[in-house]
Image (tube, rainbow, N blue to C red):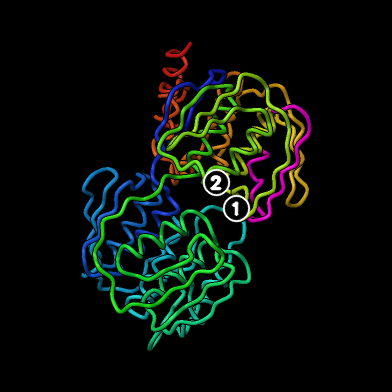
Amino acid sequence: MEQYIIKGGKPLKGEVNISGAKNAALGILAAAIMTDETVTIDNLPDVRDINVLLQAMEGIGAKVERVGKHVVKINGKGISSISIDYEYIRKIRASYYLLGALLGKYKKGQVALPGGCNIGSRPIDQHIKGFKALGATVKIEQGMIDTNAEVLRGNHIYLDVVSVGATINIMLAACMAEGKTLIENAAKEPHIVDVANFLNSMGANVKGAGTDVIRITGVQSLHGSEYSIIPDQIEAGTFMIAAAATKGDVVIRNVIPKHLEAITAKLEEMGACVEELDDAVHVFANERLGNTHVKTLPYPGFPTDMQPQISMLLALSKGTSIVTESIFENRFKYVDELARMGTNIKVEGNTAIIDGVEKITGAVVSAPDLRAGAALVVAGLVAEGYTVIDHIEYVERGYEDFEGKMKALGAHMDKVDMEDERAIQKFKLKIS
């Protein structure tokens, strides 16, 4: 097992390039198996979730060829199984996108009930509702979701709650259904738009992605395509927070500034400086920031995946801030870890009341999930002394070369084997 060791107190300075969006890539990879022709996908992030999904696709017979670190060729012609092994599903929740892809292409699919980060209940009832509306039968037996349809027919589907996963899964199934499908109360996140654009590049007819009404006219078949994934808004936001927290000066490149507006607005409210460029944002701060209130909401609201990071920043800011989590009910598990570093955060239900402190100190902490792990890294960069973070496999699910990018900005940070005491001592000697 590996862990991060960080010596805090150094402002981040320089430039960082953002990788492709993990959440878009997961939907796009699943969609790629819906054609028997070869699809080439560029700007693919080299993170654990992506690699596990590619293995799952190979496991059912798809041909996967890694052309480069960030480029993959996929051909779904040789798929021989419509059942996705639990071994893959338990590692990443988004493997369930293969269910919509298989149902759309083969009119049947079987996937284990999903796992992923432990941040609360994320039911799949809206996925099932959508599949049934298209004419599929859905059974849950022995931990597997089994879908089957004689024929898929377009329908009017109203989602009871805004769900990114359900929106993508229904889009995948509906794009090869007979007739027209209307998805109302659809999610509007940038990766919804990216998956729709990718489907259209393969010959699908999807309109309205990015609004709350998506219209899909089914086609008989899809064809090969070459496509480049959008930049990762959450990785970009994490580096924006890290720059502000360390009182640094960082240019974050390969981003779409419009996707970052909710994060930019909160940072500016707190007193940080954010300059938007064509495909970059420049974030800098030279003093302790002020307080603000944050409520997570579906896009274009403040993203739930940025809640732990901004809560950590607010824990170091002046005054009292309130953070309300309206998406997931169990997303404050990291608060106990931050408390070990000296923060003052009180959680009441889905609300955190944060009294800012002037400084925090290093400690041994454990990442409870992906985004909380990133927040703990940022805390370590600010803390006095050394911070050691366990369970960094969560962080590596969604951040490519996180410690390498931080080190390039001047951070004192390394990834070490937790059994190797000499590596930790060597790190301390190197930076002392």
Give the residue at x 45% y 83%.
136
Outermost residue toward the top in this view: 432
Outermost residue toward the front in this view: 278
Q: Which residue is mark 2?
A: 369
SS under mark 1: loop
Give the residue at x 66% y 46%.
332
Outermost residue toward the bottom in this view: 150
Give the residue at x 62% y 57%.
120
Occupied quadrant, residue 46:
top left
Q: Are marks 1 and 2 in contact (CB under 8 Å)?
A: yes
Estimate the x, y position of residue 249 in percent, counting from the top left. 52, 22
Q: Earlier in the sequence, mark 1 or mark 2?
A: 1
Estimate the x, y position of residue 197 in percent, counting from the top left. 38, 60
In magenta segment, residue 313 = no
Which residues make up the magenta segment? 317-337
Relative height, residue 145 to residue 276 (above, below):
below
Estimate the x, y position of residue 404 in percent, counting from the top left. 39, 29
Please indicate whether residue 345 sits to the left or right of residue 83 in the image. Answer: right
Q: Which residue is mark 1?
A: 119
From this viewpoint, is residue 415 visible? no
Relative height, residue 66 to residue 14 (above, below):
below
